[in-house]
Image (tube, rainbow, N blue to C red):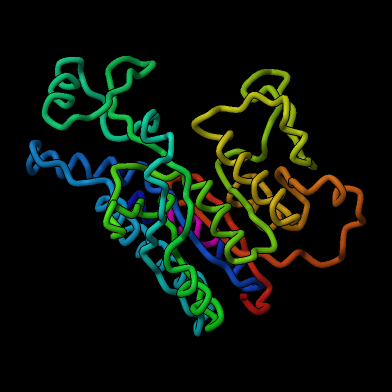
Amino acid sequence: MTAQAQHTNVRIAAVALADLARDHQIVVAHGNGPQVGLLALQGAAYDPDAPWPLDVLGAETEGMIGYLIEQELMNALPEGAHCATLLSRVEVDPKDPAFENPTKPIGPVYTSAEATLAVRDHGWTMGTEASGGSRRVVPSPRPLRIIGLDAIKVLLQAGHTVICAGGGGIPVMRNAAGKMTGVEAVIDKDRTAALLALGLQADALLLLTDVSSVFRHFGHEDQIAITAATPKTFDDLDLAAGSMAPKVGAAITFVKTSGKLAGIGRLTDARAILEGRAGTRILPEAATSRPRKNHPPKTFGFTGADQSVSVWLDDGGAIV
């Protein structure tokens, strides 16, 4: 994961996003899993006895990846376009049951002896990898509130493309004294995407990844692409917990709450998904029988820089 490789990957994403930004007002967010792991390793190399907290690492990656996206997106957009990158704190509930059951793996794979030392020295919870070895696992609480949502709206009203809520946001909670404090946790980026899209009253949520759509029997010879769907379509579908399941869950939350479109598919198909020519499109039960309009829906946009992208866009109407 070199700096050059990240520039190249972000440049590819920026071309697809710029295509949408020419017709829509977009908000861009990003994943940060590999980058958090890299920073954790760098910190351990400097002082293995004093690991940096996850909220600080999350903030660092928001700045680093946000810079890369902003620069490549501005290079791809016409002259005169405006873009702003924000660090986003996301509040979680200190009583969230996720804190009693850490499940999100982060960082490198440790040997048994190294894992024992990590538990002793840092109090970490360790999980066993299917391929062998152990990794640290941390809580993944649900996002409750995106702090600074009003600032995002102001920038959108001023015509800026906004990059925010990276990696699910910087996890914070209120302590017993009512003050905000950082949390040793990782918030699922797809859940935060849905929360942000709802908070901005987005007209569509596109969750983009490196596969063309959601499939039944994915990876098998009889796999079948799901194109038009409703939330009920996924009732009996067994999806991978670490990849497609969070995206489908976020899409269903957005569709059920807003009554609007959510799409899942490949980054390079972003416009085609929005216009109904590619990907998996999820609509409320009643909406699937309505005739399609001749113009694309208004949307806001969300994207991920770790090969997992979500996009929601707007035609330039008022943000309320």
Residue located farthest toward the front when viewing the structure as drawn: 177
- Residue at image point 48% right, 70% down: 162
Q: Using the rendered view, name the quadrant where residue 316 is placed.
A: bottom right
Q: Is 195 left or right of 175, judged from the image as shown?
A: right
User: Picture coordinates of residue 209 (x, y %)?
Assistant: 56, 44
- Looking at the figure, which quarter contains the N terminus? top left
- Looking at the figure, which quarter contains the C terminus? bottom right
- Residue at image point 63% right, 39% down: 248
- Residue at image point 29% right, 43% down: 184
How many discs appear? 0
- The kind of secondary structure the magenta stretch mainly shows is helix
Q: As rendered, which of 84 and 78 lies closer to the eye?
A: 84
User: Picture coordinates of residue 172 (x, y %)?
Assistant: 34, 53
Magenta stretch contains residue 12: yes
Q: Is residue 33 above or below residue 123?
A: below
User: Picture coordinates of residue 317 (x, y %)?
Assistant: 68, 78
Q: As rendered, which of 79 and 161 lies closer to the eye?
A: 161
- Residue at image point 43% right, 34% down: 97
Q: Using the rendered view, name the quadrant where residue 71 is placed.
A: bottom left
Magenta stretch contains residue 194: no
Q: Is 245 left or right of 60, judged from the image as shown?
A: right
Q: As rendered, which of 84 and 255 lies closer to the eye?
A: 255
Q: Is residue 121 above or below residue 155?
A: above
- Magenta range is 9-15
User: Picture coordinates of residue 298 (x, y %)?
Assistant: 71, 67
